[in-house]
């Protein structure tokens, strides 16, 4: 074999040691999680240049004529680099599977700092982490050691190249990595979707896999003009607004909304006392927190999102409201939520406390520290994690057993047993959520914030508890993950009736609140206050590649339709007769109705290619009916 070829082939083999994990990760990222194809090239460039830098360092070590200790130390360092890359990939996939987004580095740092508390929530032994990490490192180290023993190209290379050549190669690898990193970072806002840069750029990460980039500049311009055109109304007697959002809160597990279990004793007592102005189920616009919270704030469907949209908080600030956010969980590092929910006069989230970041007791404690209400109209948004799989659960609320956190993907239980335990775990969280609501409202009452106030209790999205084989959220758009409560209480005043609406959406919350305050609703908002009859014909939802709508034109039969713009699969359910979504009726429906729905979804991201494929579908259906 040619001498140079004897050197080149081992180098290629060692490069594969770095690139094969990257290729496997990209396969899952693109094919399973619908990451953009445009991410493949930039990511392979980054990992490839990183690998070249490591190979150059290995050459420099060889030129130093290392002893056994130096060589082992370098192999340990080399292995740590590979382990870090593997763990990064695992972290990315966990984030995509759990909340539908590439995790930001700062978000990961928060949970890394609280890894013991996180394991306790997952009911996993603390010793598990060092055991797993130790096993991964040992395997990688043995692989690296074996590869370095077999692939001895540095010794051969050093025979015809002096150390300056090796230094230049290592430097070129580092320069290439830095160049590709800057290039990719600069392009990430053009939707390349490269995961490393999404991790570093939390603002862009917030847009990934959810927004429709076409026409974004025009949308921003239109929304900025609408925000500038809004004129505040005349504020009546100061009325406070308390918005309480339960994370992953699905309405059909609330006793107050006719669930078979008594999961909400406090809310039940309020209902019996006639305190509710409205109690009903509603629907979220997506299946994860960022877009759910943005929809509540902006009164917009996901495809209408713009950074220029006028938010509920901004409207209230223009009416001289004091704006306060007290939020369980990490909103500071969660894709810029703390800025997107602003402006604020008071901001606090779980990263600022001394306890576990997702412990709702810290929210109650922080609310108790508020000063007595001074008569200035105040908006308070409170976010609770008791109903979320990562929320801190307390022993006094473990009523339904056996219970297992469904975020533990591998439990070893049968599917039936896993679903029972997941349901029990979730219902215990609802009990704790209900008790937290009680503590919050009693505290706010003591501090006089409820002397004249409207309180809304809702969710950012629902949760899957084994339905259709899914657990958690951000994976699908089936009913349980879009199913949220909408509860409204009035304190210290009475007002016109709020009419239940069978298919109310998150976009209706902000306009309903402005109606309660007697303030003008921005013309640019997509929702409508619940004092008014339903005027829109369609409500929209989407999660990643699943984009759909509720067809509200016939009140006696509401269709829920969605299509996956990657796989081209389509689903249609009779939302009133088949709320469990057990029978996909898409093949039974007229082709022209499906075509009409597809046209409605064009602004949400359905392309002309999708419409062309739909024409093929309709032609095939017509041919079948003709035969």
Image (cartoon, grey):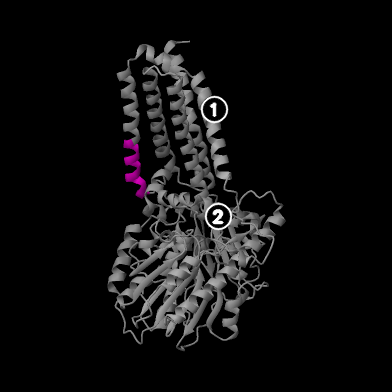
Report if residue 1 lies within the magenta region: no
What is the magenta range? 178-190
Q: Nearer the viewer, mark 2 or mark 1?
A: 1
Q: Is residue 124 above or below residue 539?
A: above
Instruction: Give the residue displayed 41% in from the left and 19% down from the top.
Output: 66
Which structural element holds mark 2? loop
Who is closer to the viewer here, 172 or 589? 172
Q: CA distance from mark 2 to mark 1?
A: 36 Å
Work out which quarter of the rendered image holds the C terminus and state it.
bottom right
Report if residue 187 lies within the magenta region: yes
Asked whether residue 205 appears in the rendered view, the answer is yes
Q: Is residue 228 left or right of residue 336?
A: left
Instruction: Give the residue displayed 43% in from the left and 42% down from the top.
Output: 39
Q: Is residue 280 above or below residue 451?
A: above
Q: Position of residue 169 (x, y in %)?
A: 34, 24
Instruction: Give the residue displayed 47% in from the left and 29% down from the top.
Output: 76
Q: Is residue 271 above or below residue 314?
A: below
Q: Main secondary structure of the magenta part?
A: helix
For label 1, the residue is 142
Check whether the beta carbons of the residues at disc 2 and disc 1 lie within 8 A of each other: no
Q: Is residue 187 left or right of residue 430?
A: left
Q: Position of residue 417 (x, y in %)?
A: 71, 56
For label 2, the residue is 475
Q: Is residue 488 left or right of residue 425?
A: left
Q: Position of residue 537 (x, y in %)?
A: 49, 72
Q: Is residue 591 above or below residue 208?
A: below
């Amino acid at each position: 074999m040619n001498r140079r070829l004897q050197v080149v082939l081992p180098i290629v083999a060692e490069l594969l040691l770095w690139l094969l994990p990257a290729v496997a990760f990209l396969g899952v990222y693109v094919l399973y999680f619908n990451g953009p194809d445009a991410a493949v090239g930039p990511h392979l460039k980054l990992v490839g240049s990183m690998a070249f830098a490591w190979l150059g360092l290995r050459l420099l070590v060889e030129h130093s004529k290392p002893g056994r200790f130096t060589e082992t130390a370098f192999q340990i360092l080399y292995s740590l680099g590979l382990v870090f890359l593997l763990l990064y990939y695992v972290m990315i996939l966990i984030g995509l599977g759990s909340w539908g987004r590439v995790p930001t580095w700062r978000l990961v740092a928060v949970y890394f700092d609280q890894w013991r508390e996180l394991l306790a929530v997952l009911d996993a032994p603390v010793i598990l982490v060092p055991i797993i990490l130790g096993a991964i490192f040992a395997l990688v180290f043995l692989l690296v050691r074996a590869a370095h023993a077999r692939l001895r190209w540095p010794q051969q290379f050093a025979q015809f190249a002096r150390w300056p050549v090796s230094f230049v190669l290592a430097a070129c690898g580092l320069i290439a990595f830095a160049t590709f990193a800057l290039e990719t970072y600069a392009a990430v806002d053009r939707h390349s979707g490269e995961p490393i840069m999404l991790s570093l750029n939390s603002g862009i990460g917030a847009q990934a896999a959810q927004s429709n980039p076409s026409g974004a500049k025009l949308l921003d311009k239109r929304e900025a003009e609408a925000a500038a055109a809004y004129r505040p109304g005349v504020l009546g007697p100061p009325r406070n607004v308390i918005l309480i959002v339960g994370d992953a809160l699905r309405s059909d597990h609330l006793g107050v909304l006719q669930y078979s279990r008594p999961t909400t004793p406090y809310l039940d007592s309020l209902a019996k006392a006639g305190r509710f102005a409205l109690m009903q189920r509603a629907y979220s616009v997506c299946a994860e927190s960022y877009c759910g919270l943005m929809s509540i704030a902006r009164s917009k469907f996901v495809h209408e999102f713009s950074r220029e949209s006028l938010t509920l908080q901004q409207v209230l600030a223009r009416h001289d409201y004091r704006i306060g956010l007290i939020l369980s969980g990490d909103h500071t590092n969660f894709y810029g939520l703390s800025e997107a929910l602003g402006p604020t006069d008071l901001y606090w989230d779980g990263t600022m406390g001394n306890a576990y970041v997702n412990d709702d007791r810290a929210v109650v404690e922080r609310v108790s520290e508020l000063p007595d209400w001074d008569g200035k109209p105040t908006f308070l948004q409170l976010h609770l994690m008791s109903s979320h799989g990562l929320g801190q659960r307390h022993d006094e609320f473990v009523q339904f057993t056996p219970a297992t956190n469904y975020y533990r993907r591998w439990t070893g239980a049968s599917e039936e047993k896993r679903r029972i335990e997941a349901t029990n775990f979730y219902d215990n969280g609802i009990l704790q959520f209900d008790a937290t609501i009680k503590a919050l409202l009693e505290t706010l009452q003591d501090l006089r914030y409820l002397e004249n106030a409207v309180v809304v209790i809702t969710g950012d999205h629902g949760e899957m508890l084994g339905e259709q084989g899914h657990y958690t959220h951000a994976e699908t758009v089936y009913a349980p993950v879009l199913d949220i409560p909408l509860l409204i209480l009035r304190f210290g005043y009475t007002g016109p009736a709020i009419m239940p609406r069978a298919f109310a959406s998150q976009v209706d919350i902000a306009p309903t609140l402005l109606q309660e305050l007697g303030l003008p609703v921005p013309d640019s908002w997509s929702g409508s206050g619940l004092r008014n009859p339903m005027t829109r014909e369609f409500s929209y939802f989407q999660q990643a590649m699943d984009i759909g709508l509720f067809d509200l034109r016939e009140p006696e039969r509401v269709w829920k339709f969605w299509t996956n713009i990657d796989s081209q699969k389509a689903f249609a359910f009779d939302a009133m007769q088949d709320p469990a979504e057990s029978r996909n009726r898409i093949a039974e429906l007229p082709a022209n109705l499906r075509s009409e729905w597809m046209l409605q979804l064009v602004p949400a991201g359905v392309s002309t290619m999708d419409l062309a494929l739909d024409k093929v579908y309709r032609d095939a259906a017509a041919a079948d009916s003709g035969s």
